[in-house]
Image (cartoon, coloured by chain):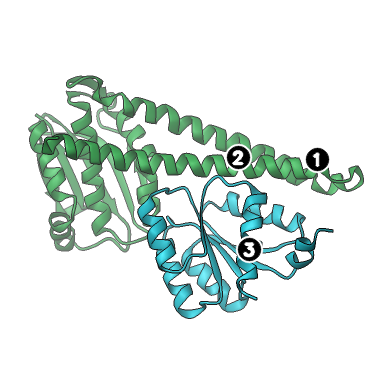
Chain colours: A cyan, B green
Amino acid sequence: MHENENHDKHIKILLVDDEEELVSTLSERMEMRGLDAAVAPDGPQAIDAIKIRLPHVMVLDLRMPCMDGMEVLRHVKKHNPEIQVIILTGHGSAKDEEQARRLGAFDYLQKPVDVETLISRIRKAYRHTL
Amino acid sequence: MNPETEKTMAFFGKMTANLTHEFKNILAIIQESAGLMEDIMAISPLSKEKYQDRFNNSMATIKNQLHRGMQLAARFNKFAHAPDQTNAQMDLDETIDHFCTLTERFARLKNISLQAGKGTPPGANLTTNPVLFYMALFYGLESCLAVLPANTSISIAPAEKNGRQAVEIVCSGPQAPSADEFSDGLRKSDSWNELEDAAGQLEAEIECETRNLCLRLIFK
């Protein structure tokens, strides 16, 4: 087993996206790789999920119903700054990336992303929480 | 660039950004579903059986997303050809149905449902400038989205008013605003000026029927 994979089972991940088929499949692929990934379909449910189970890393879409991803990011960084947030979006404006990074996003990725690339960024984000 | 061209470019930019976002979501779902199938194929043959349902579900998801993508692409292609002619005959039922598919995400992001209604009489046509027609519909929709709360509905359909061809954008739902709030809110919305501008160029009248929360565009 690769050294990274020993740590993987300790990483708690929360995937937040209103494309439920995307996050459910992604979480299943992560579980097959020994990662612990929960899902939330929107911002309010993501905030509720954090209260129950604090993730190390949150993978967050930007454009969602109920609550915009930027609002979720702002909320998380205010109340749980220890959570590292990776933005995963199909909305590719440089302005959004700049704002997300200014609000404290750890990384900013464009959809679609290779699962191994995403996992490697999650590992990197997790190391920042230690 | 003159102000009219700038406005048209801004409108096409909004529509294109919205649709590329949809396509990226579709591609991401297909990529993950295909990836999951690949993962299942790679595991030991002995444990494959327990993943059979998941494998089949992934296949179904890919087919559904391909269908969603093809529908969007076909409508987007038609929309992209709107500037080809400055005056064209448009089938209103079909055009409004396509418009609602292309803009459904704007409503979904506010938790508002959007659907194309059936016109009366069916099969109505309108000869007009297609780009300005789409712009008027879009800014009419945006104005309504600005005044409606979540869990409400919008229906867009062709109609007739005093013997003239019209399009009605009708808002409804238990949480829908009062008639006064609806009327004031529309006029104060960011898109109202753009709506007036597009309607003006089409020589269309804008009518706000507060009784049934209807924004009506009446064409010449």
* Residue B1: % across, % down: 14, 35
Front: mark 3 or 1: 3
Q: Are marks 3 and 2 on the same chain?
A: no
Left or right of residue B101: residue A51: right
Secondary structure of the residue carrying numbered label 1: helix
User: Which residue is under mark 3?
Assistant: A124
* Residue B159: % across, % down: 21, 34
In this rendering, the answer to whether B46 lies above or below B98 is below
| Chain for numbered disc 3 | A
Q: Is residue B112 visible?
A: no
Q: Mark 3 Cα within 10 Å, few/some/many (few <14, many 20+)?
A: some
Mark drawn on residue B41: 1
Q: Mark 2 Cα within 10 Å, few/some/many (few <14, many 20+)?
A: many
At label 1, the amino acid type is Met
Q: Is residue B59 visible?
A: yes
Residue contact between numbered discs 3 and 1, judged by CB atoms under 8 Å: no
User: Which residue is under mark 2?
Assistant: B30
